Amino acid sequence: RPLEMRFVADPPLAGVDGIILLGGSEDALLARYWGQPALNGGAERYTATAALARRFPEALVLFSGGSGRVTDQTTKEAASAADMLISLGVDASRLRLENQSRNTTENARNSLALVHPKPQEVWVLVTSAAHMPRAIGSFCKAGWAVIPYPVDYRSAGFWGQIGWDLPGNLGRFNQGVKEWIGLVSYYTTGRTQAIFPQGC
């Protein structure tokens, strides 16, 4: 819950020049094998990006994500992401695809190098709420101040989630532990400037 509360949901937005969608909400290998989207629990990343694209029709839409697999760097999420975004109504001419990133640090660096945003431009970053602190820390470290737009929430307060959902609870626990370890790792290796980033 602290991870997801770090940034406000549905922040006020105006004059958006670009929308960045971080990968990780689709299984690219399954998508390639079956020839159709294979979204996971983070599908809100796509739906929120499509909604923002409709709200700001002049904004570019940048997808950032290659393959996080250690043994397979041939299947990239960006290819299937383009198909997914187009199917959700995003015009192909607005899309920019970054397909070399293997982690969040590379998402930030490679995206910045791809679009070269001007200092006055407003860019919005869409990713899962629990992942947003590490993502913002990575973009700040790369020198790009973006507006966090967290989605894919998993917590609803302690009392609201009491129940016998052992697999679901273990999944949330796993996600939380992964992000806390990621934050500590990124900070100790110099990939973020704060252990729990809250902005640039």
Image (cartoon, helix red, strand yellow):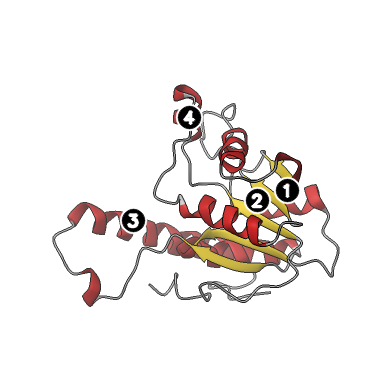
Determine the secondary structure under disc 4. loop
Distance of mark 3 from mark 2, alpha carbons? Answer: 22 Å
Callout 4: few (<14), some (14-19), or many (20+) C-alpha neighbours within 10 Å? few
- In-front residue for pair 127/108: 127
CA–CA distance in space, label 2 to label 4: 24 Å
Asked if residue 58 can be seen in this view, the reply is: yes
- The numbered mark, 2 or 4, whose residue comes first in the sequence reads 4
User: How far is mark 2 from mark 1, CA to CA?
Assistant: 6 Å
Q: Position of residue 179 (x, y in %)?
A: 45, 60
Name the mark nearer the viewer: 2 or 4: 4
Secondary structure of residue under mark 1: helix
Asked whether residue 188 appears in the rendered view, the answer is: no
SS label for mark 3: helix
Q: Nearer the viewer, mark 4 or mark 1?
A: 4
Residue located at (13% from left, 60% from top)? 164
* Mark 4 or mark 3: whose residue is earlier in sequence: 4
Percent x, y for residue 52? 62, 60
Q: Which residue is mark 1?
A: 110
Q: Secondary structure at mark 2?
A: helix
Residue 36, disc: 4
Amino acid type of the residue tagged 3 in the rendering: Asn
Task: Give the residue pinned by disc 3.
Answer: 174
Check whether the beta carbons of the residues at disc 1 and disc 3 lie within 8 A of each other. no
Mark 4 → mark 1, Cα distance in angstroms: 27 Å
Instruction: Name the residue at 73% across, 61% down.
Output: 142
Question: Callout 1, which amino acid?
Answer: Asn
